[in-house]
Structure formats: C-alpha cells, structure tokens
Amino acid sequence: MDGKLVTIQTHIVQQQQLHPEASGHFTALLWDLVLAVKMIAREVRRAGLIDILGAIGRENVHGDEVKKLDEYAQERITESLCQNGHLCCMASEERAELIPIPTRYRKGKYVLLFDPLDGSSNIDVNISIGTIFSIHRKITPGDDGRLEDCLQPGTKQAGAGYVIYGSSVMLVYTVGHGVHGFTLDPTVGEFLLSHPDIKIPPKGRIYSINEGNAQAWDPGTAEYVHHLKQRDPATNRPYSLRYVGTLVADVHRTLINGGIFMYPASPKPKLRLLYEANPMAMVVEQAGGRATTGRERILEVQPTELHQKVPLILGSTEDVKAYEEFVQRKR
Ligand code: AHM
Ligand code: MG
C-alpha cells in the first residue's frame, strides 16, 4: 500500500482494531488532539505575521516566562479535548493544578497529560518547537479524574507522542504497537503516514546535552561525554554534538538518526516526568531504544507529584547502556 494515502485518522482506526474490546473513545480523543495540533501548527506558521510572538508578561508554575503561543496551545488543547466525553481530567506543564472537565460536559475514562508548547525559549528565534502528550486510563472510581489518575508510572500509558513544528509539521505517536510518524500536508490539512514503524538505530554517532552545564556534571556524565569526544573510528568516535534546546526536536533527531540525548541529574533535573520524560520514553522504547534516569528505567519511576522533574537520558540502546555503565562505575 502507498503510505502517502494513509491519513492519521485511518491509521488510528486501524490501530484500534488491534484491540477488539475498544469502545472508540480512545480513537476519538486522538482525533480531537489532532484537530488542536493542526490549529497550533497554523498559528506557529503565522507567528511572524500576527501579534502572537513574545511573552504575555507572567510566569508559569516553573517560573518560566509564559509566551503567547504557549497560552494559545494550552487553550486549543483543553477546549478541543474537554467537550466530547473522552477524558476525566487533564494536567499540563502550564498549569499548577489538575485541570477538571467542566461540569457541563460528560466525563470519560482517559487522562491527558501534556506539554502544550515545548521549547518555548525557541519560539521567538524561529527554531523548532513541539507539543508532547501522554494518555492514561482512569483508575479511580467515580466520574471525576483525581490526582492518582495522573500519578501513574509510564508503563501504564495507553498512548503517547509528540508533534514537531519544524521545517515540516510531524506527529509521531505510539499506542504500544510501534511508533508511527505522519507529516502534515498543508495543502489538504491532513497528516499523512510518512514514517511507518520507526526503529531507532541501535547505535548512533551524535550526542546531545547542554554543554554549558559541564562544570556541574556528575563524574559519570562528565567521563562519558569526554569518552565520546576521543578519536576511535571503529566506534564512530568522536561523536558529533547537536543540541537544539527543544526536547521534541532533540528526541526526534535521536529517534531518526540514533545517538543519545542527556539531561542529567546535575546540576539539577529540568525535564518533567509526566509531560516530557514518560511520553518520550514510551516512544523511544517502542522504537527499540532505551530511556533511563541513569539509575532506573524512566517508565518505572513512580510519580509523586504533577510537576516532578527527573534526569532524562534516552536514545539508541547501545549508547544509553554505555552511559549507564559510566555512571555505575562512578557511583
Ligand atoms: P519547555 O519549553 O517546555 O519549558 O521545555 C524545557 C526545554 C526542553 O524542551 C529542552 O530539552 C530543555 O528545556 C533545554 O533546557 P536547557 O536550556 O537548560 O538546556
Ligand atoms: Mg517542555
């Protein structure tokens, strides 16, 4: 079959057919999400033309300056997903508290955790940004979602993925049967299957880390990065450094080209378990890669709070294992 003719809607339905017991709610909620990200993509494209660049003049719960596009993305996702009875609650990197479904709408059995606009500091300089999402099943009784529904380990995710607003707009997702990538054809407004069953190379030749933090790295990370810079053609060293500073872009490159992305524990973890680490870890593992805090598998970390931060090291299995060995030796 010519992959170009598979729209994301068709693909989601086909994936649902792998679960004969499915009610269709999960499929429908992904469709709602696709609508929201198409609207965000449109706004990102026009960002230079309309008065949407720049900050709105307040900080979010992490003390980051909130940009107008962050707020636009937040609103499109919550609006599109709260109305159709698929979700019991949401939680977002941009909101301190759990986001309830307004009482006028029906409640559903899924939970959506998301980072509406990842890479905010890159918005104003025309560098790729993204949206990240993670979907869980409700586990508590009653109609309304509770904190416990959000604080489930990543192994329990029903689906996860991201959108990259880059030189083209791509949506990459998994529901536990591999990872599939779709490219938005702006002329027809559809995401078309462009990257079926993505597999991350077992080993790469690129490392991705904020080198500006080198003085504060733990000895394991410092020695591993030093090792990658030594010349040894047999093992592809020295590796090249690439660091966009937008997690979605750095993970997307790692997924396609292989290699390793690191945001270690030192100087301090920055990335959020629920909105960034867990969904990216599910995608990377489903593509055959590996994701760790350096000490444990990301997907097995038990969340204790909505905005918990974790070290995140992910990528090609051989590269991530090598990192773990360096860290282990220095412990
Ligand atoms: P945010 O824009 O959602 O706040 O995301 C945080 C970003 C990630 O996209 C990226 O990986 C990381 O922060 C870069 O951090 P740093 O500038 O410390 O290297
Ligand atoms: Mg982010």
Image (tube, helix red, strand yellow):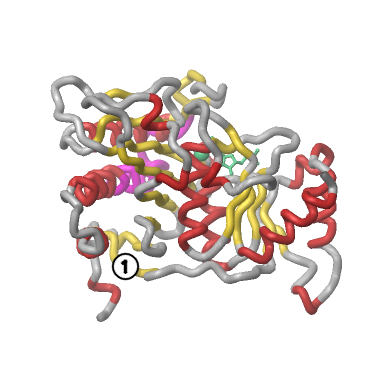
Magenta span has 81? no
Write down the quadrant of residue 49 in the picture.
Answer: top left
Give the residue at x 60% y 54%.
Answer: 314
- SS for callout 1: strand
Q: Above or below — where is 151 with respect to 314?
A: above
Q: Is residue 202 left or right of residue 158?
A: right
Can residue 35 be seen?
no
Residue 174 drawn at (x, y percent): 38, 57
Q: Above or below — where is 230 with respect to 81?
A: below
Residue 295 drawn at (x, y percent): 68, 45
Give the residue at x 76% y 40%.
Answer: 213
Write down the quadrant of residue 265 in the picture.
Answer: top right
Q: Quadrant of the C terminus?
A: top right
Front-most of residues 122 and 254: 254
Number of numbered callouts drawn:
1
Q: Which residues are magenta?
A: 37-54
Give the residue at x 69% y 60%.
Answer: 321
Residue under numbered circle 1: 193
Front-most of residues 275 and 26: 26
Extreme-front residue of the structure: 141
Residue 47 drawn at (x, y percent): 40, 41
Say if disc 1 is inside 8 Å of ligand 1: no
Residue 142 drawn at (x, y percent): 23, 25
Give the residue at x 56% y 62%.
Answer: 289
**Mark 1 neighbour class, 10 Å CA radius: few under 14, some 14 to 19, many 20 or more:** many
